[in-house]
Amino acid sequence: MPREISEPNSDPDYYDIYEAKGMAHYFKPGGGGFAYEDSLYFKYKDLGLVPRSFVPAGAANDLPDLMLQVAPSTKSTGGSPAKAKKTIKLEVKLNTAADFGQSGLKCRPNGTWYLDGQDSPEGRQMRSLLTAMGVPRIVQGEWGGAGRPKIFSHSGTAASMPQRDLDYDREHFKDIMLKGSDAPQLQTLFTYYGTKDTNYIQIGQYGLYYMAADPAGLSTLGVKKFDGTLKLRIRRKPTGSRTEPWKYRFSTALLIDKKPTPSDFDLDEVPDPLYYLDPAYKVVP
């Protein structure tokens, strides 16, 4: 079975950033994920392509990262722009290392693992998708024999978490990575973002993609359908500083495994966005 078990790693993920004090909007240690969202927002707002009512969602993962009012033209092939704009929602990722959906994991006193997280449409959808994949069963099979993690019996302070308990959890609850046939399929990603009516995703250095559908017809501009593959990381995730080893949680993260084919249209690189995206744009003879 394509499953990897390894020592825990402490790479940051968005699940932690949402709750990190003093980092409600910018994610500098990971390379500026939220700053990247803002750079696109201000660029396209200045061009008049962002709805006036829209403001960046920041860490609010129940909202789109960006909204654009577009009407793709076919001017490059001698066509004409569309007559009316369509408002589209976009997910924005700094690069292919970003996670694409999160869920928490908790363990009951009897040692049974279950998915946990926000009581929101996309949170419930993610848990439903992970349950359908058998993630709780997989976690139970890998971690269930060790009983309930010691962290759940402590109050989350240095005084309440002796070193032997820290060592126990570190040794018995190692990272699990699901790949290949065990990993989520692309439809899982498309369905998840579909709960937010989000059909487009911009990935830094790779460009703009559509997912389940292309309602604005952006494929005429070279926007490709996302064709990467996914993997699922399940881990004991440290959430405190290096001097706070007793602070950690258990979570899952949906990640890219095989990177997608680079798109032929990139919101970062397109030289004149208005030429392609604004139906009111006119070429001066």
Image (cartoon, rainbow, N blue to C red):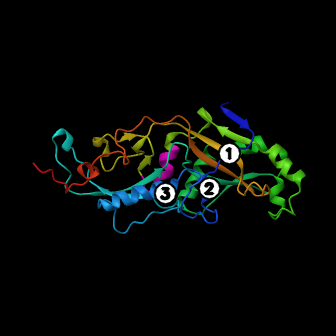
* Label placed on residue 73: none
Give the alpha-carbon distance from disc 1 to disc 3, as whole Å.
Answer: 27 Å
> In the rendered image, which residue does mark 3 sit on?
35
Q: Magenta stretch: residue 196 in it?
A: yes
Judge left or right: residue 175 versus residue 73: right
Between disc 3 and disc 2, the foreground one is 3
In this rendering, does residue 134 appear at all? no
Q: Residues within 10 Å of mark 1 (few under 14, many from 20)?
A: many
Give the alpha-carbon distance from disc 3 to disc 2, as whole Å.
Answer: 17 Å
**Are the two marked residues, 1 and 3, in contact with CB atoms closer than 8 angstroms?**
no
Q: Secondary structure at mark 2?
A: helix
Residue at the image position 80 percent from the left and 58 percent from the top: 152
> In the rendered image, which residue does mark 2 sit on?
15
Q: Position of residue 123 (x, y in %)?
A: 57, 57
Q: What kind of residue is marked 3?
A: Ala
Q: Residues within 10 Å of mark 2 (few under 14, many from 20)?
A: many
Q: Secondary structure at mark 1?
A: strand
- The part of the chain drawn in magenta is 188-198
Of mark 1 and mark 2, the one earlier in the sequence is: 2
> In the rendered image, which residue does mark 1 sit on?
234
